[in-house]
Image (spheres, rainbow, N blue to C red):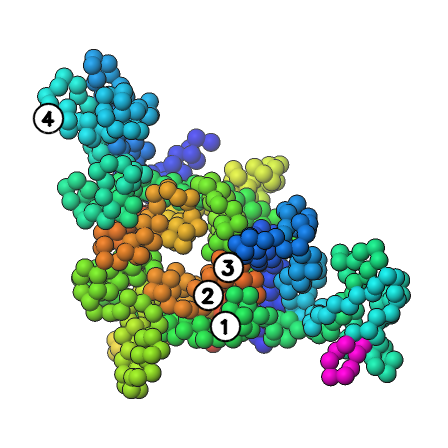
Amino acid sequence: MTTYFIRRILLMIPTFLGSTILIFIILQMAPGGPLEQAIQQLQAGAMQQGESVGSVGDIMGGGSSVLPKSAMRELKRFYGFDKPVYQRYLIWLGIWPRETKHREVEFKNGATEAQKNMGKGTYMTLRLDGELVQVYDKEGNISELWKASIDKEGSAENLTLATIFQTEFSGILTGNLGTSYTYDQPVTEVMAPRFKISMFFGLTGLFLSYIVCIPLGIRKALNHGSAFDFLSSVTIFVAYSIPGFALGGVLLVLFGGGTFWDVFPLGGFRSPTEVWETLTLWGQIKDQLWHAVLPVIAWSIGSFAGLTVLMKNSLLENISQDYIRTAFAKGLQEKRVIWVHAIRNSVIPIASGIGGVIGVVIAGSYLIEKVFNIDGFGKMGFQAILDRDYPITLGFLVIVVMIRLVANILSDIALASVDPRIRFK
Amino acid sequence: MPEQQEISLSILKKRWLKFKTLKRGYYSFILLIVLYGLSWFLPVLINNRALVVSYEGDLYFPVLSGYHSGSEFAQDAPGEALYRELQASWEQSESDNWLVMPIYPYSPLEDITVKGNKMYEPPSRKHWLGSDNTGRDVFARLCYAFNISISFALVLTILNYIIGVIVGGSMGYFGGKFDLFFQRIIEIWSSLPMLFVIIIISSIIRPSFFLLIFIYTIVNWIGMTYLMRAEFYREKSKDYVAAALSMGQTNFKVMFKHILPNSMVPIITYFPFAIVGGISALVGLDYLGFGMPPPTPSWGQMLDVGLQNISKWWMVLAPVSAQFVTLIMVVFIGEAVREAFDPKVYSRLR
C-alpha cells in the first residue's frame, strides 16, 4: 500500500514535467507575447511624443522598430527572450542558472581589457580572449560571483559589447515563481491573497454541499419513489441543468437590487477596505457572510446534483444486497441496519470522488468569480492570460496542475481508508 | 446469419419501446428533435426580410434573394428596404402592393442602426423578450443561438466519439506500449485546466465555428477515449473475439465489426450528457468572450451583456432560461436513455 502511494507520488514528476512543458510551448507559440506588447506600448508612447527614438532597425523579425537596439536588448533580457526556449524552461524550473544584475561593458577600438566600476570603490576587470570574456576582481583573481558573455547583437566593428552578470539557481523548484509583469510584485505575493479568497469560497461550498447532499441522498434512497423523492429530484434536475455561473447571474438579477429584491450585494469578496475597517468584529463576520451567500450557492450547485444522486444510488444499491436482508433476518433494528451496515458501504463512492471535487471547487471557479466580481485565484489567472503576464499564467497553471495531481492521490487515499477491501498494488 | 440479426434487432427494439414508455424523456426527445429541425428554417421564421413581396405586379422573395435596396420598392430610406415599415405603409394606404413577413419579423443582427429599433426595450408584444444593448431583438438571437449551440454540441460530440473509438479502442484492444504511451499523454492532458488552455489558444487565433470545435476537440477527447479503452479492454478477452480471430478476421474487422457493436451501450447512454457538456462549454466560452466571433448570436454573449446591465432583467433571464430549458430536456432524454438501456430495478425498503 505504502509503496503504491510512493510510486503514485513519484509518477507525479513526469506528469508534472510533461504538462509544464506543454504549457510552456503553448505560451511560447503565442504571438503577441509580453515582449511584443511591451514594444508596441513603447512605440506607441514614442509616436505620441511625436519623435522617433533611435534608428529604425529591423530587429523584431520583419517588423520595423523605432526602439534603440540597447532598449530592445534590455527588454528581451527582462522578458527572458534572449535565450532559446529549452533554456528558458530550465531556468524557470530552476535547474539552469538564472542571470541577474546585468551590467554592460564596452570594449572600444579593439581593446581586450575593460574595467567596470561596481560602486563602493570596487571594480571588476574584464579580459577579452577571443570569444570568451573572463572576469577578474580587484585583487586580480577570477571572480566566482560574476560572469560575463559577449553580446553579439550589440557588437559592432570596432566595439565589442559584453554583459556582466551574476548567476543563481532560482526557479519553481526553489519556490521562485518569478515577478509579475503587470503587478510588479513577486508572483507568490500576488497569488497568496487571491488564493485565500478562492479557498474560502471553495471550501465553504464543498462543506455545504457535503452536509446537504449526503443526508438528502440518504433520505431520497430511503423514501425512493415517494413525493419527497420526486420533488427533490426536480430540484436536482434543475441544479444539473444550470451551470453555476448562469445561476449566479440569475441570483444577481433577482436579489442584487436591480428590478426585483435588494437583499444581497452585487458582488465583491467583502465591503471595500474603508468600510470594512470601520466595522466591529461581529459586523465584519456579518458583512463577510452577507457577501458570500450568493457566490457560495453558485459555487456548490455544480457538485450538488452529482453528489446527491451518487449518494442515493449507492445507498439504493446496497439496500438491495443480500447482506442487508440477512441483517434484517437476524432481527436487527432497521435503524441499525441502515446506519451501521448500509451507509458505511454507501459512502465509498462519495469518498473516492472527493479529489475530483476538490480540484473543481478550488480551481474551476473563474466563471463564478467573474460573475460576482470577486478578485480570486481563477480571475487572476484569466486576467494574466489576457495581459500575457507569463510568470503569473505559468504559476497559476502549475498550482492548478499540482492541486489536481494531489487531489487524485487524495481520493485514492480516501478510498483506501474507508474501504478496507481495497488494496492498491 | 439472419436469425442472429433478428435477436440483436429485437434488443434494440425492446430498448426503444422501453424508452417510449418513459414519457418525460420521450417527449423531450420528440420536442427537441422538432425544435432543432425547425431551427434550420429560422431564416424563414424569424427574419426582418419579407418572404414574399408583390410590388407593382412583380413578385420578389427577399429571404432567398437577399439584399434589396429600399428604392426598389419606392421607399424613401437609404440602404436595405425596411419591410416592416413597407408593410405598414402599404396597409395604411390600401395599395395593391403587399408583402408577407416571417412570423417573427426581426433579425438577430439588426441593431439600432435600423430605423425604429431602440436599446434596452423591455419585453412587449413587439419584442417578445425585449431588446439588448445595441437594440437587437433578444428573442430572435435566442432562437438562432439555439441552433448554433445544438449544432456545436452535436458536431463536437460526434468528433470526440470518432477519436475516442479509434484511439481508445486501439488502446484497449492492442494494449502494450501503445496503451502505456497514450495513458501518459492522457494523464498529462487531463491534469491541465482545459478551459484555460482553450482560452490561451483562442486568444491567439480568433476562432470560427469549426476552428472552435477543432480546438475544443483537441482538449476534450479524453473522456470518451478512456471510456472506450475500458470497454474494448473488457470485450477483447471474451470468447467471440477469440473465435473471430481464429477464423482469420483482421484486427480492424474485429475492432469495428465485432467489438464496437457490443460496446454501444456506454456510447449511447453517454451521448446526451456529452451534449450537455458541449452546450455548457460553449456558453462558458462565449461568456468569457472566447467563443464564437461576434456578432454571432450566442447565449453566453447575451449573458455577458446582460450581467453588465443587471437591472435589465430580461437580458439575463432570457438566455439563462433558454439554456436551462434546452439542457433540462437533454438531461431528461439522457436519464430515459440510461434507464432504457440499463434497467436497474431497485428493491424498496418498504
Q: In this figure, which residue is indicated by the disc labeled 3?
A: A387
- Inspect the image, locate mark 4, and give the three-letter code of the amino acid beneath it: Gln
Of tags 2 and 4, the one toward the viewer is 4
Q: In this figure, which residue is indicated by the disc labeled 2?
A: A380
Drawn side of residue B200 relative to residue B32, left or right: right
Q: Residue A319's image quarter?
A: bottom left
Residue at the spot x=33%, y=25% of the render?
A: B66
Give coordinates of residue B2: x percent, y percent: 43, 30
Near-viewer residue (B344 or A183): A183
Drawn side of residue B202 relative to residue B40, left or right: right
Q: Subunit of mark 4?
A: B
Residue at the spot x=38%, y=62% of the render?
A: A370
Q: Residue A43's image quarter?
A: bottom right
Residue at the spot x=17%, y=27% of the render?
A: B87
| Mark 1, other Cα within 10 Å: few <14 / some 14–19 / many ≥20 | some
Q: In this figure, which residue is indicated by the disc labeled 1?
A: A190
Give coordinates of residue B82: x percent, y percent: 24, 29
Of tags 4 and 1, the one toward the viewer is 4
Residue at the spot x=56%, y=62% of the render?
A: A390
- Inspect the image, locate mark 2, and give the three-letter code of the amino acid beneath it: Met
Q: Residue A244's image quarter?
A: bottom left
**From mark 3 to mark 4, how far is it between C-alphas?**
57 Å
Main secondary-structure element of the magenta-colored stretch: strand
Drawn side of residue A2 relative to residue B291, left or right: right
Give coordinates of residue A201: x percent, y percent: 37, 72
**From mark 2 to mark 3, how far is it between C-alphas?**
10 Å
Q: In this figure, which residue is indicated by the disc labeled 4?
A: B92
Q: Which residues are magenta?
A: A117-124
